[in-house]
Amino acid sequence: MKYAFIESSQVNLPTNRLCELLEVSRSGFYEWRARGDKKVNKRSFRREEIDHAVSTAFYMNKERYGAPRLTTELNSSGFNVALNTVASSLRRQNLCAKAGRKFKATTNSAHSLPIAPNLLEQNFSCNAVNEKWCGD
């Protein structure tokens, strides 16, 4: 960003003065200009590729996998990435794994309320059709 500003402002001020003001080295600016966008494009292309693979795996697993499990899944599918790379990709895309809900028991058997009597007493044999009915 600083180098692009220097390049656009060279008409008004000399390069060495702009580099001093922005606290960058002149050699770094000239190297950036000679390099062009070659390294940036390779890096940004790889970053986009990783972001796409991470988001696809994330949504395929119902948004429940975090960086460790996504890394394992991507590596097993042949897309080699490191844990920190996956974690930074998730942060960059603002993706956050849903936490699993804890089991909460809804039945409270320790109460003093009346309970329906058990009329069958586990005796399910009968002599005729429609003699005994049961349900939840």
Image (tube, rainbow, N blue to C red):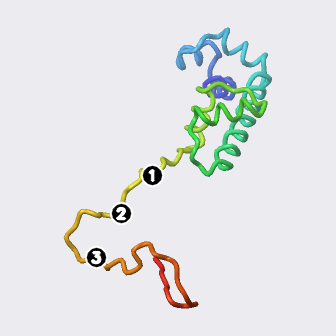
Tell me the residue that label 2 is attached to. Answer: 106
Question: Based on the displayed image, in which of its 4 quarters is residue 84 positioned?
Answer: top right
Relative side of 37 to 110, left or right: right
Which residue sits furthest top? 27
| Horizontal and vertical percent position of residue 89 | 62, 35
Q: Nearer the viewer's eye, disc 1 or disc 3?
A: 3
Residue type at numbered disc 3: Ile
Q: Which residue corresponds to the image point at 78% horizontal and 16% vertical from the top-left? A: 34
Q: Determine which residue is flagged by label 1.
A: 101
Q: What x and y, as percent, mark residue 25?
A: 61, 10
Q: Determine whether, in the image, residue 36 is placed left or right of residue 55.
A: right
Identify which residue is drawn at 56% across, 44% down: 95
N-terminal of the pair, mark 1 or mark 3, is 1
Q: What is the distance, in whole Å, between disc 2 and disc 3 at their CAs?
A: 17 Å
Tell me where residue 47 appears, x and y as whole percent: 70, 32
Q: Nearer the viewer, residue 115 or 79?
A: 115
What SS does tag 3 mark? loop
Of marks 2 and 3, the one in the foreground = 3
Q: Relative to 124, is 129 on the left or the right?
A: right
- Say what amino acid the circle numbered 2 marks: Thr
Q: CA distance from mark 1 to mark 3?
A: 31 Å
At 65% from the left edge and 16% from the top edge, which residue is drawn? Answer: 15
Within 10 angstroms of label 1, few (less than 14), some, or many (20 or more) residues? few
Task: Name which residue lies at 62% across and 51% down.
Answer: 62
User: Which of the two residues, 124 or 10, is positioned nearer the viewer here?
Assistant: 124
Q: Is residue 135 above or below residue 4?
A: below
